[in-house]
Amino acid sequence: MGKTLVIGAGGVSHAAVHKMAMNSEIFTEITLASRTKAKCDAIAKSVKERVGVDIATAQIDAMDVDATAQLIRDTGAEILVNLALPYQDLKLMDACLEAGCHYIDTANYEPEDVAKFEYHWQWAYRDKFREAGLTAILGSGFDPGVTSVFATWLKKHKLDTIRQIDVLDANGGSNDQEFATNFNPEINLREVLADARHWENGEWQVTPAMTHKVEFDFPAIGPKNMYLMYHEELESLSIHFPEIERARFWMTFGDAYITHAKVLENVGMTRIDPVMHNGVEIIPIQFLKTLLPDPGDLGQETKGKACIGDIATGQAKDGTGEKTYYIYNICDHEECYREVGSQAVSYTTGVPAMIGAAQVLKGNWRDPGVWNMEQLDPDDFMDMLNNHGLPWQVHELDGPVTF
């Protein structure tokens, strides 16, 4: 159905490319490219062994717009799936515009020198993509991504309005590492240590990182401490669903993780500005990343489950007044590893990236412009979640959350 160029060769890419290869009627030709071709070759070898599909590989500097545009032309790619670092989003969007290619990513752009998670840089490309007749889909991971589609599905099928929404992300997995992040350590720590923000009554409320903690009993996992954080889907949901009075994001962390993160911050290892070390300029958080385990290598030793979803309250479509629904997915780390060789965190981002790209290639999400997931029709995406490893369920709760 379409030739696909995937940029980036980390854990998410590993999962996404395997799932693309399992859907070769949609992804007719796949090229995987990154700065380090050997990583692409390793994923290609795994895909061949597990799925029996050949994929092409290439070396590319994603910050080189002209080289990326030429690679798009050389591969004939209809869509570029950006699974690289969020610093590279704008360059890859520029390359798509230059070469005439659709675009999709899993995380919004942020400048490399400041932890600032905002969509306005990418939203500024709306007219360019519209005029070029091209589609750009932002944030097709799980959160953002599936959690936004969950909200849209609830609005389409259960609720006329959403008054308040909480996104809950719990990872009940464990491994043998003293300290390891679930995804790219640099991006993970920048998110975790940023000030928490949530949307309430028409404005942003800001609190220091990791200061607002609530215990929640997660399906298939049990009670876990979750912390109020900022996540980019709050920005887009609060704009595209203007009736929302309160939108919050929560993520679970163990006590040991919080202690390690705070110590690293206190000693300066999470700094994102350059420092001089023995006459060489380094960025501490990037040096730290080289010392920490690669999340893509943790699949075999990670056990347990992840549970991610939304709790939304609003006026019911059936006219029975206000109702609250909890819609979520439960994902097993060991099952993910058996299927594609990834742990659940990579899987829950990589599979929605595949499904989002499939929506473009199938023609379901093809209107020219730049779109967030909640702006798009949810039904085929939701069906594909059920059919491709991320089944979801929805339950009515007794009332709104009290935390």
Image: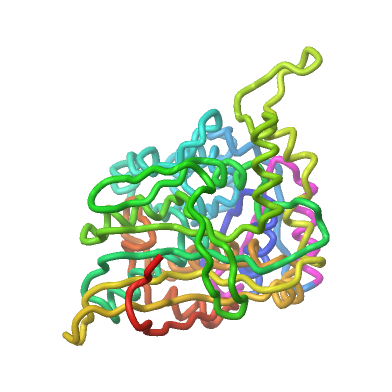
In the foreground, 318 or 248: 248
Locate residue 199 relative to residue 61 in the image: left or right. left
For residue 177, which quarter of the picture? bottom right
The image shows residue 399 at horizontal and vertical percentages of 32, 78
The image shows residue 144 at horizontal and vertical percentages of 46, 58
Residue at horizontal 43 percent and vertical 53 percent from the top: 138
The image shows residue 389 at horizontal and vertical percentages of 60, 78
- Examine the rendered structure and indicate whether residue 210 appears above or below residue 315: above
- Chain part drawn in magenta: 23-49
- Examine the rendered structure and indicate whether residue 123 appears above or below residue 19: above
The image shows residue 23 at horizontal and vertical percentages of 60, 74
In the foreground, 5 or 181: 181
Q: Is residue 379 magenta?
A: no
- For the question of whether residue 163 can be seen, the reply is yes
In the foreground, 209 or 344: 209
Q: Is residue 48 magenta?
A: yes
Locate residue 199 relative to residue 336 in the image: left or right. left
Residue at horizontal 35 percent and vertical 65 percent from the top: 165
* Figure quadrant of the C terminus: bottom left
Residue at horizontal 59 percent and vertical 67 percent from the top: 224
In the foreground, 97 or 301: 301
Locate residue 149 relative to residue 306 in the image: left or right. left
